[in-house]
Amino acid sequence: MEPIRRKRPQNFVNFLAFLALAAFLGLVMASSTLAKQTSEPKRLTNAKGGDCVACHGQAQVMPEGHDDTKDMTYEDCLACHDGKETASLRTNIPLGHIHHLQGVSCQDCHGDSGEYNALETDECFACHDSGEGVAKLTEGHGEENPHNSPHYATDLDCELCHHVHEKSENYCAQCHDWALVVP
Ligand code: HEC
Ligand code: HEC
Ligand code: HEC
Ligand code: HEC
Ligand code: HEC
Ligand code: HEC
């Protein structure tokens, strides 16, 4: 009889411990979804590009005291953000935002199917001409032309450097230490 009597309360203690753990995990999960709701920006397809609060909520994406940008276009931003007295916006906001502020909508890039896939380089050319075309735009901009190199000529996929919703990267930096600022 002894072992059985001891076992019962032990099971009960285990059960209590399980309840406490479940309640604790529940709390942790609830508070982390709460944190997500307040800090993860939404991709509202109908918000204006300058209306940071619409998508970011109260999360601070602007320095304190910055002018209200709700109705601004990219041109308005550049009046101050000239890369001289005030920082360039390249790399300070994602490339998708730079498009949005210039009137390029989600559907202009992703189409109307409701699917959001990465774009092929040819799909970028729908608006950006061609490899030779973009190479011309950046001729003489910096130490080297990222759009025209002895290795790849003007034939390099855009996504190797430009990301639309994440930080872009410098593909050449694997081997060269040129400080390219990639929008
Ligand atoms: C009236 C001038 C002015 C206008 C217009 C303006 N900004 Fe700014 N912005 C500033 C100043 C000044 C700073 C802080 C100093 C700096 O970053 O060089 C700043 C900082 C920022 C920062 C933080 C940059 C960092 O280094 O962290 C972002 C992001 C930003 N602005 C976005 C925008 C966007 C987007 C627009 C247009 C929708 C815009 N600003 C329009 C003056 C302006
Ligand atoms: C300039 C073209 C362009 C615009 C404008 C654009 N996207 Fe994208 N989107 C891309 C590309 C390219 C990718 C592949 C990932 C990347 O480059 O960041 C992508 C990926 C995505 C993805 C899937 C991957 C992920 O990061 O979750 C979603 C969802 C998405 N876009 C939604 C949107 C919405 C919503 C808008 C409008 C607010 C928008 N996109 C505007 C080009 C664009
Ligand atoms: C629906 C048209 C459209 C599509 C598709 C598109 N763009 Fe753009 N893009 C624009 C417009 C408009 C501008 C602003 C004017 C300009 O620079 O030509 C721009 C500007 C840019 C800039 C310059 C940003 C800056 O800092 O000035 C880059 C880089 C860029 N696009 C890359 C891409 C890449 C990479 C793709 C493919 C993933 C792409 N774009 C797809 C319309 C488009
Ligand atoms: C090796 C990296 C790299 C690749 C690949 C790349 N870009 Fe760029 N791109 C850059 C850099 C760096 C800049 C900024 C150059 C500057 O003005 O200093 C830039 C700037 C641009 C601009 C703005 C030009 C302007 O008028 O200032 C456009 C538009 C653009 N890229 C489109 C594209 C498209 C479209 C593709 C694909 C065919 C592409 N890029 C592939 C690195 C790259
Ligand atoms: C349409 C919704 C939308 C609007 C409007 C918007 N954002 Fe965003 N923002 C996002 C999303 C979603 C992301 C996550 C990356 C992405 O999808 O581009 C993001 C990412 C960012 C990032 C990079 C975040 C990081 O942690 O590196 C910065 C900075 C930023 N936004 C600043 C701004 C500023 C400044 C404005 C107003 C001028 C603004 N955003 C307007 C939706 C938006
Ligand atoms: C996998 C490594 C690698 C990558 C990635 C790479 N390069 Fe190079 N690159 C080299 C090597 C190696 C040389 C030869 C260096 C020499 O002869 O001094 C070279 C030479 C060059 C030269 C000749 C002038 C010089 O400085 O020697 C240019 C211009 C150049 N690369 C541009 C680029 C550009 C632009 C990119 C990005 C689009 C790029 N490279 C990416 C390895 C690379």
Image (cartoon, rainbow, N blue to C red):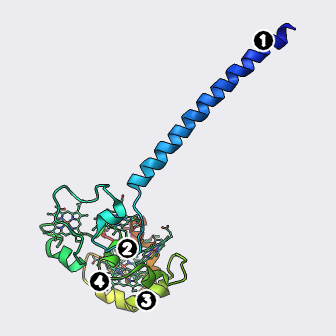
Number of marks in the rendered image: 4
Left or right of 135, for residue 113: right
Looking at numbered disc 3 in the image, what kind of residue is underneath it? Phe
**Closer to viewer: mark 1 or mark 3:** 1
The residue tagged with tag 3: helix, strand or loop?
helix
Instruction: Decide if ligand 4 comes within 8 Å of the CB at mark 3.
Output: yes
Instruction: Measure how far apart labels 4 and 2 are at the Cα level.
Output: 20 Å
Please give the residue where the numbered disc 4 appears in the rendered image.
Answer: 138
Q: Please tell me whether residue 1 is drawn above or below residue 172 in the rendered image.
A: above
**Closer to viewer: mark 3 or mark 4:** 3
Left or right of 2, for residue 67: left
Q: Where residue 125 is drawn, which disc sits there? A: 3
Q: Nearer the viewer, residue 107 or 163?
A: 107
Instruction: Decide if ligand 4 comes within 8 Å of the CB at mark 4.
Output: yes
Instruction: Measure how far apart labels 3 and 4 are at the Cα level.
Output: 16 Å
Asked whether disc 3 touches disc 2, contact meaning CB atoms under 8 Å apart, the reply is: no
Marks 2 and 1, the one that precedes in the sequence: 1
The residue tagged with tag 1: helix, strand or loop?
helix
Q: Is residue 152 visible?
A: no
Asked whether disc 2 touches disc 1, contact meaning CB atoms under 8 Å apart, the reply is: no
| Position of the C terminus by quadrant | bottom left
The residue tagged with tag 2: helix, strand or loop?
helix
Looking at numbered disc 1 in the image, what kind of residue is underneath it? Arg
Instruction: Measure how far apart labels 3 and 2 are at the Cα level.
Output: 16 Å
Looking at numbered disc 4 in the image, what kind of residue is underneath it? Thr
Badge 2: how crowded within 10 Å, few (<14), some, or many (20+)?
Answer: some
Q: Nearer the viewer, residue 174 or 105?
A: 105
Image coordinates of residue 100 in percent, x first then y, are: 34, 77
Please give the residue where the numbered disc 1 appears in the rendered image.
Answer: 6
Instruction: Decide if ligand 5 comes within 8 Å of the CB at mark 2.
Output: yes
